[in-house]
Amino acid sequence: MGDPRWCPHPVVVMGWWISMLRRGAEAWAGTRAWKLRLAGGLITLVLVGGSGLAGWAVEQLAPTPLLVVALASALAGRSLEQAVVGVLKALPNSEQPVQNQAGQALQPARQALAWIVGRDTADLDAPEILRALAETASENGVDGLFAPLFWMLLGAGLWNLNPAWPGPLALTWGFKAASTLDSMLGYRRGRLRWLGTAGARLDDLLVWLPCRLVAMSLPLAAGQPGRCLGVLAAARRDGAADPSPNAGLSQAAYAHVIGVRLGGSNSYGGQIRQKPLLAAGLPAPDQAAVLQMLQLNRRLELLWLTAAAAGAFITKTLS
């Protein structure tokens, strides 16, 4: 459905709370590591718990159309696709080989890319812009679409057992709160190396299973059912060197299914960080590969929803 424009997005509201709580925590804790860790844990508890309770209240009190809109706002598939396609459209001479694109002509694409990736984009050439797009399409396909969809479907299952229990929106908003905490505080620099620890670890934990389910089911969406276990094994192997337990694995799964090479040197705040090579030996991603990743996201989302609907129908029939 895309993000609703007529009201503040729930993630924006979460961001307001995080910013306010962070200011209070840093004023109280100063530079003392143990106080920052304690404050980070309390922020995580308040935000995740409060978001889950807010979702539960909407489930119990709001009319169905509002619940549908709230659920749709938690799935970032369309907004991710629009952002990635926007960068592709900003690349000059898209029909020409990317090696011929350089200089000031790349500035619109670099600026658009800066909105959706954490790395420095000011000096990227066209092949590096395409690599960044492929990596964000794969990593954020898991973080922004399939991980919240997993918790949404799990909540729907709980709701089916007992409508009074927390259901799809409660679990999904709780996950989105952890994800937003990781995005805003989960950095290993300054005070955030302690203040953001709890949120980052919780996000890693909540994404762990959905990430591996994506790696195992992605070949099905690509019409390669015989590769499910092989892609999972290859993604675990290639992604093991990444400091994140999920980012490298999710990118590696897409790289092996699409048949492209990801990873390499990235600049963050002027500092070079070497990311592990994923699917080494394969060609670098081009525009067709990036678009294929977005198409796979749509197909896999439909596959997950179909499987969940079939499971619900079978369960209801047997009961």
Image (cartoon, rainbow, N blue to C red):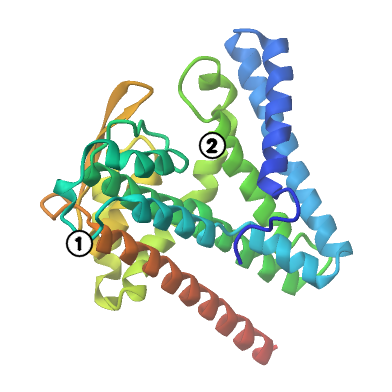
| Three-letter code for the amino acid on which mark 2 is drawn | Ser
Left or right: where does residue 305 sit relative to residue 232?
right
- Tell me, yes or no, if residue 233 can be seen here: no
In this view, the residue farthest toward the left is 281
**Residue at (55% x, 28% y) in the render:** 197
Residue 122's spot in the image, x, y percent?
33, 31
In this view, the residue farthest toward the bottom is 317
Tell me whether circle 1 and circle 2 mark residues in contact (CB < 8 Å): no
**Residue at (27% x, 76% y) in the render:** 224
**Residue at (29% x, 51% y) in the render:** 236
Residue 221's spot in the image, x, y percent?
36, 74
Q: Which mark is residue 5?
A: none
Q: Secondary structure at mark 1?
A: loop
Instruction: Answer above or below: position of 313 versus 288.
Output: below
Q: Residues within 10 Å of mark 1 (few under 14, many from 20)?
A: some
Residue on which the image places disc 2: 183
Residue 220's spot in the image, x, y percent?
34, 75
Instruction: Answer above or below: position of 269 versus 233.
Output: above
Q: Which of the two residues, 291 or 146, is positioned nearer the viewer here?
A: 291
Dot 1 or dot 2: first in sequence order is 2
In this view, the residue farthest toward the top is 31
Left or right: where does residue 82 sit relative to residue 273?
right
| Three-letter code for the amino acid on which mark 1 is drawn | Gly
Image quarter of residue 305: bottom right
- Tell me, yes or no, if residue 76 can be seen here: yes
Residue on which the image places disc 1: 259
Quarter of the picture containing the N terminus is bottom right
